[in-house]
Amino acid sequence: QSVLTQPPSVSAATGQKVTISCSGSGSNIGNDYVSWYQQLPGAAPKLLLYENDQRPSGIPARFSGSKSGMSATLDITGLQTGDEADYYCGAWDTSLRSVVFGGGTRLTVL
Amino acid sequence: QVQLQESGPGLVKPSETLSLTCSVSGASVSNYHWSWIRQPPGKGLEWIAYLTRSGDTIYNPSLSSRVAISLDTSKNQVSLKMTSVTAADTAMYYCARGAVAILNYWGQGILVTVSS
């Protein structure tokens, strides 16, 4: 049971937009920044967004994030088949004194 | 180009100690924060620990009694030791540069199986 809650799966057609949600509580998302990771099949996770909406160098603008209250969202526009992956949100939890992750969302591009 | 490479035994017996090393190139380990994360087969990510560049260590409370993270600056490596392993510790283990939830470089991971 993950501290952060994500939908297990989402799907959308090539070229479309998809939104992945991440729900937490006041001790994690409500109190700190959220990061997002992309894990392609058979690969290590890769930082996609940090501090809610900041993209590391090399991450396309098709990937964007936001946070409101105790929830965060990852938006991916112009979907490509290469975006098929598992996506994880993460944050620091001040009560648990621990980094916590969501259970992951598998994106299928139709 | 920052690169991280995990190494260690792929198979560990129950109750034994797991020792993993992360060799870093392209960055000095003493200048950054470092973390270990694991992922059981087919499951999600679990944070294990991080070590700040000032030497502070923060551990996952559920693992804190069994794990230790450290640096070897002479070899530019980050290490993880986990004692009294059980089958539940079977996972892909990743080292990463960064701390808290901002992990911007990851190793490819090493699969560790706990079995007799």
Image (cartoon, rainbow, N blue to C red):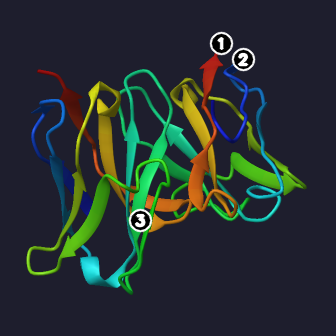
In the rendered image, which residue does mark 1 sit on? A110
In the rendered image, which residue does mark 2 sit on? A13
User: Are callouts 2 and 1 both on one chain?
Assistant: yes
Chain letter, disc 2 residue:
A
Residue B50: mark in rendering = 3
Instruction: Give yes or no for contact between labels 2 and 3 (Cβ–Cβ under 8 Å).
Output: no
Q: Amino acid at mark 1?
A: Leu
Chain letter, disc 1 residue:
A
Q: Element under label 2?
A: loop
Q: Residue at x 61, y 32 (%)?
A: A103
User: Are callouts 1 and 3 both on one chain?
Assistant: no
Instruction: Give yes or no for contact between labels 2 and 1 (Cβ–Cβ under 8 Å).
Output: yes
Report the Cα–Cα distance between label 2 and label 1.
4 Å
Q: Element under label 1?
A: loop
Measured from the top left, where is residue A110 in percent x and y?
65, 12
Q: Amino acid at mark 2?
A: Ala
Measured from the top left, where is residue B19 in percent x and y?
15, 51
**Residue B1 seen in the figure:** no
Which residue in the rendered view is the most extreme toward the bottom?
B54
Please identify the quarter of the rendering in which residue B73 is found.
bottom left
Left or right position of B16 against B49: left
Q: Residue at x 79, y 64 (%)?
A: A31
